[in-house]
Amino acid sequence: MNFALILFVLLLVSGAIWAVDSLLFKPKRAVDAKEPWWVEYGSGFFPVILIVFVLRSFIVEPFKIPSGSMIPTLLVGDFILVNKYTYGIRLPIINKKVLDINQPQRGDVMVFRYPADPSLDYIKRVVGLPGDKVAYQNKRFTINGQPVKLGKQEDYLHPERLYYSKQFSENLGEVEHRILNDDDAPSFINDALLFPFRENCLYNNSGVICTVPAGHYFMVGDNRDNSRDSRVWGFVPDENIVGKAFFIWFNFSDLGRVGSFK
């Protein structure tokens, strides 16, 4: 469901009702006459829909985390806020950038439209920037020949599935975050798809090595062995970017999660 398109249609309809009534019908009504129901509802909802549309399109948008691909940073059921302007102002519906502000940086957690099906929103972490040579070999990332720094942490217990994963701290750019690896998962990528610029990637028994094309990003989940990401379906083009995730504002199962996003 394209909620932005639905909201835009509601904005046009309610705005048209408000405008037509203000210009044509209202001046002819008696001062004490009751507004028709369609005017009452249409005009009444117009400012509310306008505010929601502007906030959601240009300022901040809420999302709910549907899967465990970003554990331990984000858990299933986390409600997060996404900054819609930090990477530039984009026109709603068509998602065309009209004003450049900042570029995504390594380590950012970013929401984007899934390249294979833009009707779906995905959330992953930025690992590779345009022009980077990103190697994922034996469950370790190297970027432009430099190994990404890892630090061993205590094993992570998955609360619902009741098993342990190895946990590490990882440094991408200026961002330190935690990632998970499973001993019983293979290093190689066995389900890679055909995607644009696939010729930029070399798959081998140890993983994958890719050169990120211009205007694209290499996105990976923090739950490394339980995430379908750029290692499988390729690069995210700039026009698919939705915004930067920055805050957990609610979780029905754990109120302590509020504000814990890093």
Image: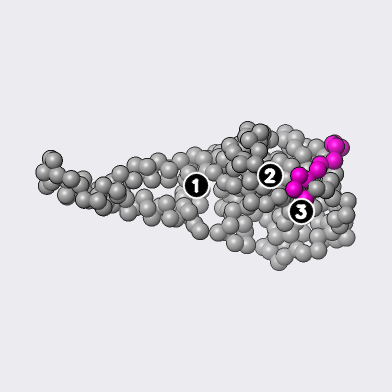
Most common secondary structure along the magenta stretch: strand
Q: Give the residue at the far bottom of this rendering.
A: 194
Kindly indicate whether the residue at mark 2 contacts the one at mark 1 (C-beta within 8 angstroms).
no
Identify which amino acid the numbered label 2 is placed on: Leu
Q: Is residue 62 visible?
A: yes
Specify the quadrant that holds the C terminus: top right
Mark 3 burial class by Cα count in 10 Å: few <14, some 14-19, many 20+ = some
Label 1 SS: strand
Write down the residue under mark 1: 90
61 w.r.t. 184: above or below: above
User: Which residues lie in the magenta part?
Assistant: 149-161
**Numbered badge on residue 226:** 3
CA–CA distance in space, label 1 to label 2: 28 Å
Which mark is nearer the camera, 3 or 1?
Answer: 3
Please provide percent x and percent y for residue 220.
72, 50
CA–CA distance in space, label 2 to label 3: 13 Å
Identify which amino acid the numbered label 1 is placed on: Arg
Tell me if residue 151 is in the magenta stretch: yes
Comparing 256 with 186, the one in front is 256
Q: Earlier in the sequence, mark 2 or mark 3?
A: 2
**Numbered badge on residue 75:** 2
Comparing 261 with 190, the one in front is 261
Comparing 87 with 11, the one in front is 11
Which residue shows up at 61% across the image and 38% down it? 248
Which mark is nearer the camera, 1 or 2?
Answer: 2
Please provide percent x and percent y for residue 206.
87, 56
Identify which amino acid the numbered label 3 is placed on: Asn
Q: Quadrant of residue 110?
A: top right
Which mark is nearer the camera, 2 or 3?
Answer: 2
Tell me if residue 250 is in the magenta stretch: no
**Numbered badge on residue 198:** none
Label 3 SS: helix
